[in-house]
Image: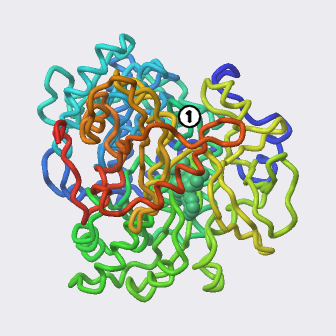
Amino acid sequence: MSAVDAPTWPREFAERYRAAGHWRGETLGGMLRERAAAHPDRVALVDPGDGPDGARRVWTYGELDARADRMAAGFAARGIAPGDKVVVQLPNTAEFFEVVFALFRIGALPVFALPAHRQAEIGYFCSFTGAVAYVGPGLLAGFDHRELAAAVRAGAPGLRHVFVADPDPGPFTALADVPVDPGAVDPGADGPAAGCGTGPSPGDVAFLQLSGGSTGVPKLIPRTHDDYVYSVRASNPICGVGEDSVYLVALPAAHNFPLSSPGSLGALYAGGRVVLCPRPAPETAFALIEREGVTITGLVPPLALLWTEAAASTEHDLSSLDVLLVGGAKFSAEAARRVGPALGCRLQQVFGMAEGLVNYTRLDDPEEWVNGTQGRPISPDDEIRIVDDEDREVAPGATGHLLTRGPYTIRGYWRAPEHDARSFTADGFYRTGDVVRALPSGHLVVEGRAKDQINRGGEKIAAEEVENHLLAHPAVHDANVVAEPDAYLGERTCAYVVLREGAGPLRPAAVKSFLRGRGLAGYKIPDRVEFVTAFPTTGVGKVSKKDLRATAADAPASSVPLPTPTPFPTPGRTAPSETDRTA
Ligand code: OOB
């Protein structure tokens, strides 16, 4: 990654992190290579069969490694080169790992999209990153990603390839037709991978992760091999992950939480096993826990609540489950207390961010901390500052803005210098936008948020992004999007809209249809749309989101429709279908 793409750690910090043994010169592709050499016959991945051929697939480390090589050789033969960006939007199937490790081997950068993303997001990722390829499913949850790819390709001339993980790829290439024999071997840092040159260096950016964001367009997060492998390696002992661990990927595989905290990569790093869960509904997940002997998994709070309730009446044997990680949004102490007794496992709260910093409660923490805090940082070199509005440190124990810097927290976004100026301090601390307080032990309690974002059950929605889409409606004069409380999701989205003078009547459903028609992911469609004649203002005449939030919180629950589909699918709630364009 060149300096123009993103700021990186100053030399003295990089040296310090190497000297401390955090950065050990590992790459993600090399990690798999080493594990495959050490124990080729051990099972790495179990895909229970939601894949293209519908059959249960079990891949050993040796097989996954060989498949990644063959896929890398196929990609390379099609011209995918080191440094190229490839937007990857795959569900929780074995192909996700085959593709991602293949790209790591080449030194091409996966851009991690979520299954719920639609044309607005995928189109933006492709054009902003200049992606040369998109890898997606065929039909998924009733949505045809081949059609999405066709529409995206029309607007992204640099997108040379579309690979479809489906036997019917439409006008594109079936992913299954890509792999070729690596043949002429070109050994590099990562070992042999035909056509892949020497492979990436540990300090290179491995992939671009998505920021939850609070701005008009999503920001991309450049994570290096060295920093990411460190966060994974250091998470493992904190979460008790070892070679006997079986990690269930219940959340979307590409999200930072199930990928690295400690996630699928943690399990693979330890030589353990990864089980892919096609959907996080208790009936699906519980059956897999029993059948595959799952020991650890991670969930967002709404799903943790659902599992806790469903456990009371399940006939499945969940006794193998040892640790449940819950994070992505605030988990109330009251809900936290119910997890252990209901599921017969230990709870770990996780407060993390794709930008880096991850906090865990420790397995030997007193119950009070496990239930009532969001944990403490992974690394002794994670620096935490809690400051007031003027960036002055608050008194110990007082609430303030969380700033952080450390060996796996980025120093800047990918090609976003103007955001960096706002999101990072001059000395490189990331402004998380979270409002926290710290206990003397270093455990953090998340008290709120200063960023203009809605955290819808773990899904992050940037208010400005949705507002911009609303403003594109010809009848809309102005729009403000805020969070309102939801007993299940924690927060849901309410859009306040002022119509243009003389604009005809508009129904909330028509506004939502308009947003869906613009190709916005389902979870970003406001749960409620309210028409108002004006917005409340602050003393200086700015729109007061605080007052709008208060108004939203007072709104009668009956006016709130059911939530829209989410990339962290929350079963048990009916969701409008993708084709519900006129309701
Ligand atoms: C995880 O990552 P992101 O990038 O989707 O979202 C990060 C933001 C945090 O800044 C915070 O606002 C919120 O999500 N958050 C929490 C939380 N965990 C995340 N807020 C309250 N309590 C928590 N436990 O969400 C993520 C990444 C890695 C591991 C776990 C979660």
Residue named by callout 1: 215
Find the residue positioned furthest to the top: 157
Label 1: how many Cα within 10 Å (few below 14, some 14–19, many 20+)? some
Q: Nearer the viewer, residue 238 or 418?
A: 418
The quadrant in which the C terminus is found is top left
Left or right of 88 on screen, residue 226: right
Residue shown at 56% from the left, 39% from the top: 214
Quarter assignment of residue 398: bottom right
Report the image quarter containing ligand 1: bottom right
Q: Amino acid at mark 1?
A: Thr
Query: What residue sits 65% from the left and 54% below the top?
Result: 434
> How far across and how far down the image is residue 72, in percent?
38, 31
Q: Position of residue 564 (x, y in %)?
A: 29, 50
Secondary structure at badge 1 equals loop
Disc 1 under 8 Å from ligand 1? The reply is no
Q: Is residue 400 above or below residue 186?
A: below
Q: Position of residue 469 (x, y in %)?
A: 40, 29
Q: Residue at x 65, y 50 (%)?
A: 450
Q: Is residue 144 visible?
A: yes
- In what quadrant of the picture does the N terminus appear? top right
Give how far across and how far down residue 34 sits, in percent: 51, 50
Of residues 565 and 191, the one nearer the viewer is 565
